[in-house]
């Protein structure tokens, strides 16, 4: 077993060797600029790019012409939100989203608020699920966009995309989904789900970093966008800039590989996730699952270990690469805004660990991880004044803490 | 986040983890911090009432590696000191000893608070 064991597949993934292989010729031999219309160097790669477009589109039930290449999902989210907001401003300035979206959605929304747009952040239940009735009721005549992610990167909770699409389509409002964590892991079909805009990125599905796409619907309705990057009008005017051909080739290959094995891989990952959770919950009390128990990304497990702080826990398991919602692990000293939005108390947010399993995760690695976690948690609980107080029967919510 | 070797050492092999009897007249208990902040330290001192010297100290901490190291170090430093000497331990000394980065300085502040809280508790209980 190679240490440390990587269990942070929701953060990023290694590039699959087959993907690396597919990209190589485009670094040195077929290095042309896809926009070079006058010679074979350009024509050659243009053809390859179009094939990639078609493949990527097909994976989500879309046409190749509906794929706009970007530098990644963050850019795609920005383009979708700022692009729609700008183009449709005469129709209205109201946008609906959720408080647990990725910052690449939330921050552009906040930026729009500064410009006078109104953003509604839907309420969530303790699993991070929205209320479809509230969504429907929140849509007004001046609503121009609903942005709700496919699967949450921290807690794994899935949104009911089909049901959301029914509502937005019926009310004539555009539906954008940040499907960064979903594409290649769970079935997504923009036709079936009536999705109008979709963000995705290669590096979450064993492709290279620095390349993603935004799906922009062309029919029923035809979605228009104001570009956020100017300079030559590439990608039908929606995103200027020389295409990252090597990235695009890798992206398409990565997605192709993911789609091949998606169903069986999802099953395998769910099995690993459940195995890890079962082992932890057998040995440890005060263990809490964050996110929906079943409607969640197949590879994501996010748990809080009561009375033990996340960063100190990660220090104790440095043979594992995982992430935590603890404030100590963020430069801002703020605990995870996602866990906060669920109403998980700050103390449990500080005690959370996110495990992301992936293509190269084995049963042995999961068992090893469980063992290491259990030992570390028990050790830290022996050092924990909070655990001691709880064992003595103290109700921590009644304690007067001194804050500093 | 790169930890200094001393922080790692205190984390792997913390000094004086445990509890003293808080009902003992010669024990002072300081409990500082808050779960919502991600930092709670309990620091206890056992004082020789004749010499006013701290003869034993124990700690328990809920917090990151730097918080654990700061409180572990605090218990090491107060042992063998008089109450007055312990009262004058400064967080900056902890920062220097553990090479804490700016973002972790508050851990050392909390450790200093914990020492003072334990001493205050001891003194107030002796007056009862």
Image (tube, grey):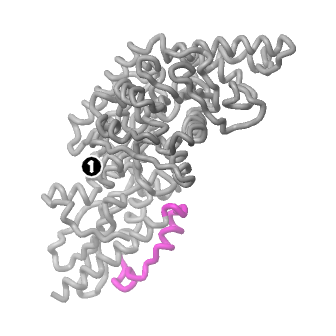
Q: Which stretch is magenta?
A: B79-104
Left or right: residue A395 versus residue A74 is left
For the N terminus of chain A, the image quarter is: top left
Decide: is B34 above or below A278: below
Q: Is residue A199 rendered magenta in the image?
A: no
CA neighbours of label 1 inside 10 A, class few (<14), some (14 to 19), many (20+): many
Residue drawn at (31%, 30%), measured in percent from left and top?
A276
Look at the magenta stretch and give its main secondary structure: helix
Instruction: Return the residue nearer the eye: A268 or A219.
Output: A219
Residue drawn at (71%, 17%), measured in percent from left and top?
A24
Q: Most extreme residue toward the right, as rendered?
A: A38
Decide: is A381 above or below A282: below
Instruction: Return the residue nearer the eye: A382 or A329.
Output: A329
Residue A56: where, in percent of width, then height?
A: 57, 17
Residue drawn at (55%, 45%), measured in percent from left and top?
A108
Residue B56: where, in percent of width, then height?
A: 29, 72
**Can I make out residue A364 in this image?**
no
Which of the 4 quarters of the picture holds residue A223?
Answer: top right
For the C terminus of chain A, the image quarter is: bottom left
Which residue is under mark 1? A306
Left or right: residue A108 versus residue B17 is right
Instruction: Return the residue nearer the eye: A386 or A199.
Output: A199
Left or right: residue A223 versus residue A50 is left
Decide: is A90 above or below A20: below
Instruction: Return the residue nearer the eye: A334 or A195.
Output: A195
Residue A391: where, in percent of width, then height?
A: 16, 55
């Amino acid at each position: 077993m190679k240490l440390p064991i990587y269990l942070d597949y929701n953060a990023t993934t290694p590039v699959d060797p087959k993907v690396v292989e597919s990209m190589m010729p485009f670094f040195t031999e077929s290095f042309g600029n896809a926009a070079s219309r006058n010679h074979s160097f350009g024509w050659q790669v243009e053809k390859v790019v179009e094939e990639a477009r078609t493949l990527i589109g097909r994976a989500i039930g879309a046409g190749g012409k509906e794929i706009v290449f970007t530098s990644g999902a963050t850019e795609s989210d920005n383009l979708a939100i700022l692009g729609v907001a700008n183009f449709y401003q005469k129709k209205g300035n109201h946008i609906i989203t959720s408080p647990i979206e990725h910052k690449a959605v939330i921050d552009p929304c906040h930026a729009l608020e500064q410009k006078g747009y109104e953003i509604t952040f839907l309420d969530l239940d303790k699993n991070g699920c929205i209320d479809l009735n509230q969504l429907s009721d929140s849509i007004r005549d001046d609503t121009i966009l609903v942005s709700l992610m496919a699967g949450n990167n921290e807690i794994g909770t899935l949104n009911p995309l089909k049901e959301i699409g029914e509502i937005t389509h019926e009310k004539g409002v555009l539906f954008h989904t940040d499907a960064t964590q979903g594409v290649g892991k769970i079935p997504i079909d923009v036709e079936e789900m009536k999705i109008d805009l979709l963000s995705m990125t290669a590096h979450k599905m064993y492709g290279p970093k620095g390349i993603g796409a935004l799906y922009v619907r062309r029919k029923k309705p035809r979605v228009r966008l104001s570009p956020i990057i100017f300079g030559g009008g590439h990608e039908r005017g929606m995103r200027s800039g020389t295409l990252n051909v090597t990235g695009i080739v890798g992206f398409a290959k990565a997605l192709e590989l993911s789609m091949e094995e998606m169903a069986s891989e999802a099953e395998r990952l769910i099995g690993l996730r459940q195995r890890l959770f079962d082992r932890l919950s057998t040995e440890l009390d005060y263990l809490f699952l964050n996110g929906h128990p079943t409607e969640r990304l197949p590879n994501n497990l996010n748990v809080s270990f009561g009375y033990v702080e996340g960063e100190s826990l990660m220090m104790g398991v440095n043979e594992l690469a995982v992430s935590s919602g603890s404030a100590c692990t963020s430069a801002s000293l703020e605990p995870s805004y996602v866990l906060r939005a669920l109403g998980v108390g700050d103390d449990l947010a500080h005690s959370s660990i996110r495990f992301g399993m992936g293509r190269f995760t084995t049963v042995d690695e999961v068992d090893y991880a469980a063992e290491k976690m259990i030992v570390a948690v028990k050790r830290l609980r022996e050092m924990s004044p909070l655990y001691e107080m709880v064992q003595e029967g103290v109700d921590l919510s009644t304690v007067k803490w001194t804050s500093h | 986040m790169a930890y200094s070797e001393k922080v790692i050492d205190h984390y792997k092999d913390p000094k004086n983890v445990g509890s003293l009897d808080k009902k003992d007249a010669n024990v002072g208990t300081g409990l500082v911090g808050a779960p919502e902040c991600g930092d709670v330290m309990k620091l206890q001192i056992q004082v020789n009432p004749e010499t006013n010297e701290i003869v034993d100290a124990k700690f328990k901490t809920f917090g990151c590696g730097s918080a654990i190291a700061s409180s572990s170090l605090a218990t090491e430093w107060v042992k063998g000191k008089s109450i007055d000497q312990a009262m004058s331990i400064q967080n900056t000394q902890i920062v220097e000893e553990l090479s804490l980065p700016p973002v972790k300085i508050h851990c050392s502040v909390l450790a200093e608070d914990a020492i003072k809280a334990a001493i205050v508790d001891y003194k107030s209980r002796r007056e009862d």
